[in-house]
Amino acid sequence: MVRVPLLAGFIGLVVVLQTAPLYIGLVLGAVLIVYGAVQGRSGAALGAAAEAYAIGYGMTGFLQGGLRSFAPAAEEMMIVLSRLSLAGYLIPLLAIALWLPARTHYFRIGSFRNDICTPFIWRGIRDPIWRFLLIGTMVIGACCLFLADFGGPQVLQLVQYGLLFAVINSVLEEVLWRGLILPRMVDYAGEAAGLLATSAAFGLYHYSLGFPWIVCFCFGLGGIFMGGVTIRSKGLAPAIVLHVVMNIAFVLNGLIFP
């Protein structure tokens, strides 16, 4: 139970940053640093990561405005390029990673042959990760066939923008959430609790991108599988593949581009 307040504090910080002035989030991040320091090195590192995330939120907003001002007229390309603003999160979190290295590391390709269980990551039907990804792709693709509009006049252009968006967004979000934040959570609270806390924060962070809270909750469920794949594979590549597939489905279903 002693671990819960700091995990909940990080999740709350994600919500506060999107619903209140930035300075409130920075103050909350500072509080988490102090509270985390009392918990030991892993707590102090997680608290520092929370404050870095708050700083990154402000930097991302600044970069997003700059990227949009230089982007081409096509709204789809503006949306694609705006995802490069995620670098605003990465800069302060990478600085913390260099200052306070995590014990857990996922900055590697990872194994597609390691096992993962469906539906509870560690419990359920056991499959190698490559088969899990293949089955997941088939299920996502089947759902997409029923909801996607393939008869639109600009469907090929939409697919091109969608692929570009999916690659940029998936790589940067996986580096952020599963490469930098998940290891802090795992160091502090273990794999299961760290996975759940990271996934909840990941889902809720999408509110600032214009998604309603119920959709953010669904993204959090998806984050459990992407985080689970990361933990089981010990790397980011399998999660990036899953993330790309999901993003392409979102594009074809009209969730990304107007």
Image (tube, helix red, strand yellow):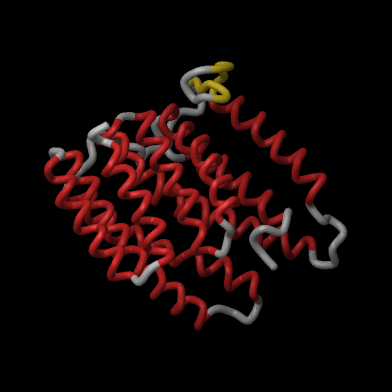
Residue 20: percent from left, percent from top: 38, 68
Residue 234: percent from left, percent from top: 39, 31
Residue drawn at x 84%, y 63% as measured from the top left: 152
User: Does residue 208 appear in this view?
Assistant: yes
User: Is 8 displayed left or right of 226 in the figure?
Assistant: left
Residue 258: percent from left, percent from top: 70, 68
Q: Give the answer, above or below, for where 149 lies relative to 37.
A: below
Q: Give the answer, above or below, for where 49 lies relative to 27.
A: above
- Please tell me which residue lies in front, 21 or 180: 21
Q: Give the answer, above or below, for where 195 lies relative to 175.
A: above
Q: How many marks?
A: 0
Q: Give the answer, above or below, for where 138 lies relative to 254.
A: above
- Please tell me which residue lies in front, 226 or 13: 13
Q: Quadrant of residue 212?
A: bottom right
Residue drawn at x 43%, y 27% as measured from the top left: 232
User: Does residue 238 appear in this view?
Assistant: no
Residue 19: percent from left, percent from top: 43, 65
User: Is 204 displayed left or right of 35 in the figure?
Assistant: right
- Extreme residue in the right direction: 151
Give the position of the N terminus as an image quadrant. top left
Residue drawn at x 59%, y 54% as measured from the top left: 166
